[in-house]
Structure formats: structure tokens, C-alpha cells
Image (tube, grey):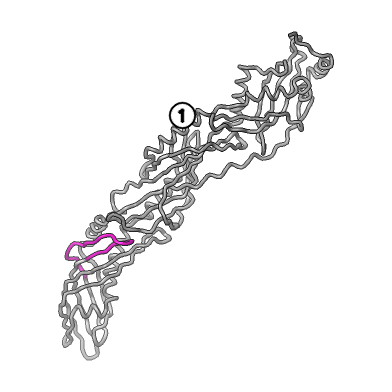
Amino acid sequence: MKYRTTPAILAMICAFALCGFTAPQPKRTPPPAVPPIPLSTVSATLKISGDNLVAMLNERTKTQLAKVEGQDINCVIQKCQLNLFATRTGAITGHPTGSGMALKLPFALHAQLAFNSKYLKTGGDAVAQGEADATTQLKLGKDWRMDAHTEGEVHLSNANLNLGPLKMSVTELWNNNADQLSTPIFKAIDKRIAAAFRLRGQAEKMWRRLQQPTRIGKNPDTWLVMAPQRLQVTPLKTEDGALVVSLAAEVRARAVVGSEPATPSTFAKLPPPATLDTPSNSFEAAVPVTLTYPDAARLAMEQLKKNPLRAAGINLDIDKMRILPSGNDLVVQTHFCIANKWDFTHLLDSCGDVYLRGTPRFEAHSGKLAIANLHYDVASQNLMLRLTRALAGDAFSKALEPHLVFDESRQIARLKAGIANALAKPQGRGILLSGHISSFGDPKLSWTKDGFLALLTAKGTVSADLNLKQPL
């Protein structure tokens, strides 16, 4: 069928020829806010066996167990001054119980007493064998340091102690001053056991590790970034002959595609521990599938070069395209020319800008992003838009819409496989992160000032392994 142009349209084209038609900028509102990143948990379980703890106590108390010098105590009729030395005579034995340890400590006691009164000045000494049955319970303080509290009983052989005319047994002396004399031994136990649990150092390592990006994929490069919010800890408990404590960090995890995110120059300070009732390592990470507006426009232009646009029998030569965000939709700015077959010189081509609006759409089953429901932005109408509507009506927007579909299925598949495979292998140095991704949720579409954003949620478990072989 031979192409014809009506006299009215021909006159309009001639009137508009040789002119560039600018249009007023469309009205735009800020793009929607990015959906919040869900809270996740990265957990670590720390264990110290009872055998290791007892071995450490034996190693660090080889000689003197406790020492008292110049202590005032009750000596039947008045105060005496006591020097006391307690030395281990055998191996400490014990086992975990509750939030601490039950211990037996065999020791030798050397006591020196000085009795000084108006009528009598004398002194004496005695050596006795003893055993302390003690129970130590541990509690974590706000500064991440362990507070140990030991209680128990001390049993002594019935050695005699002579102070001039005064005679008494060491056991009697001890019983009359149990709080004063047992305390040094129990404090020594407190100090040694609390020193075995360097939990603050491990917590700081974990807290810093979570602030550093972890590579979880290649082609494209993908990084897991976790913003830790707080660190929780369970009370110590006994489990299978060991003292066990679980750490759980709440993080907001997201995947970043592209170059490696910068590691903070200054790490966030370790917060005080929060109480954790039940350990968990449930994990969710927001994985973004992004397409910038310039890249989307470039892809659309590549399609248009392969399949030039034709609407209502008219060739529309689009040479420029921009995609602009708005609050409820996207604006597509096109610049094109309407050519006439009979004008081989193209001197009478009509060129200008036309703005259209469309709604972002995402098909979860196909992985395709699209700008749908494309229509003219009448508020930015100019002469070029009037000409386009006169010549092609709505055919232009309907013909352009198929070129604004972008297949992201391969990128999504690569991200899913890369993240799942990377987390299955321990990542990092010192503190290893590893996990299992059980499922990926359907992407939720949004858009920002820079481009399309489809967020899919990776769900599973992620744990931190401190790789401890020695006591904490």
C-alpha cells in the first residue's frame, strides 16, 4: 500500500520542519525509599572443657596457693596476728557444674601466730594438711569480663598450735576465723578461673570481623556486608563436660555487587553484652539485583537499533533516551525524528523530545524487569508530542514498550549460585564465617535515584567459628 500524507498533516510537518521541539520538564517526586534490610543473626559457640580448665589451674598454681600476712584474727581471749601460707600438695581435681566448676584442692598450711598482750608476748607456728571443697560460679559483666565467685569448705588435719600457755588446734583457729582465712584461697581460685575466660577478646574479634566485607561471589564480584547492631550472649552452662557460652550478633546483611566495599578505618566500639536466652544462627541477607537507568537506556537503544521503531506506518528514529525516577513511576525521555518517505534529503524531518511515563514491573518467574503501562506525559506536552499523537496516536507508546523489557534472570541465577557456594566454604582469617542458604525469596521491586532495585532475600544459617583449641 502506497504511503500517503494528508494535506493537513503535511502542512503541520512543513510548519514544524527544521525546528527542535523542547518540552517542559515533567513533574517528578522523590523515588520510593529502599526497603529496610532485615535483622539477621550470626552465632558462635565457645566451649572450654572441664579437663582443660583443671589443667590450667594446676599449671598456674604449682606452688603458692594463698598468702596472708599480718592478719588480725581471734585467738580465744584476744586478737593475734597471723601469717599464713597455703601451698598445693597434689593435683587439683574437678568438673563443670552449673555456670562454673566444682573443685578439690589439696594443700599444706603453714601458720605463724604472734600473741602480744600487756602480760604476755609469745608466738608459735604449726603445719597442717588441708583440702578445700569449692564451687566457683561465673557471671559475665557489662565490660565483657568474667566475675568469679567461689564458696566452699576447708577441711584441716588436727594439728596443735602452742602459744606459750595457750594451746589450740589449727582446725579450731580456722573455724573461728573461717571467713578471713578461707577468703584468700577462694580469691585465688576466682582469679585463676576468671583469667581462663578471655571472652572480651573473642567478642571483639567477632565484632570487628563482622564489620569487614566478605567476598561471596565472582563474575560479577559480590561482597557480603554486615552492619552489626548488637552482640548477645547466653549465660554459661555445663554441657558434655564443658562450660559453654553462645554469642549471637544481630546484623543487617546485604550483598554488594561490584568493587570491594571499603573496610572501616575505625571500627565501631564493642557494645556491652545483651542477654541471649536461646542461641540461634538464623540468617537473612538482602541480595540486590540492580540495573542503572543509563544501562537500561543503553540496552533499550541497542534493541531499537536492531529493530527500528515503527508505529502507525511511520518510522520513528529514536537517537536518545533517558530514564528518570519519580515517586510512583518512571519517566522515559525520548528524542526522535519523524521522517517522510518522499523527503530523501530529510530536511523536513521533525525532531524533538517526548516524555512518557510507565510503571516498573518485575516478573519473578522470568526474572524480567520492565517499564509497563507506558503512556504520554501530557503535563510536559509540546509541539512534538502533539505531532506524534496526531500521526501515531497511542501506537508509539505501545510500540516502544516491548523495548523496555530487561532480562535479569542470568544475573539472578549467578548471584544465587555464587552466594550459596561461597558461604558453604569458611570465609576469612582468624574468625571463619560459613553458612548454608536454604532458600531465596522472590525479588521485591523498588527503584532508587540511580536505577532499578530488585531485592531477593537469601535465608539460611551463618555461623562464626573462632577455631579455639585452647581455653578462652
Q: Residue 219: percent from the left, percent from the top? A: 46, 29
For the N terminus, the quadrant is top right
User: What secondary structure prevails in the magenta region?
Assistant: strand
Residue at x 68% of width, y 20% of height: 318
Q: How many labels, in total?
A: 1
User: At label 1, which amino acid type do we have?
Assistant: Asn
**Residue 5 placed where, x, y %?**
79, 13
- Locate residue 136, reporting x and y percent: 30, 65
Q: Quadrant of residue 106?
A: bottom left
Residue lying at the far bottom of the rendered structure: 119
Of the pair 42 and 76, the residue shown nearer to us: 42
- Front-most of 239 and 116? 239
Residue lying at the far front of the rendered structure = 365
Q: As displayed, is residue 149 above or below residue 238? A: below
Graded by Cα atoms within 10 Å as few (under 14), some (14 to 19) or many (20 or more), the crowding at tag 1 reads: few
Q: Secondary structure at mark 1?
A: loop
| 346 up-or-down from 265: above or below | above
- Res 239 quadrant in image: bottom left
Residue 128, how many percent across, how many down? Answer: 16, 74
Give 222 or 245, whichever is nearer the viewer.
Answer: 245
Indicate whether 45 appears above or below 409. below
User: Which quadrant of the structure image shows residue 180?
Assistant: bottom left
- Range of residues picked out in magenta: 86-104
Q: Is residue 351 left or right of residue 451?
A: right
Q: Residue at x 36, y 50 (%)?
A: 45
| Residue 92 shown in magenta | yes
The image quadrant where one finds the C terminus is bottom left
Task: Report the side of 262 relative to 56 (left or right).
Answer: right
In-image side of 168 versus 470 (left or right)? left
Q: Check if residue 422 falls in the magenta segment.
A: no
Residue that badge 1 annotates: 219
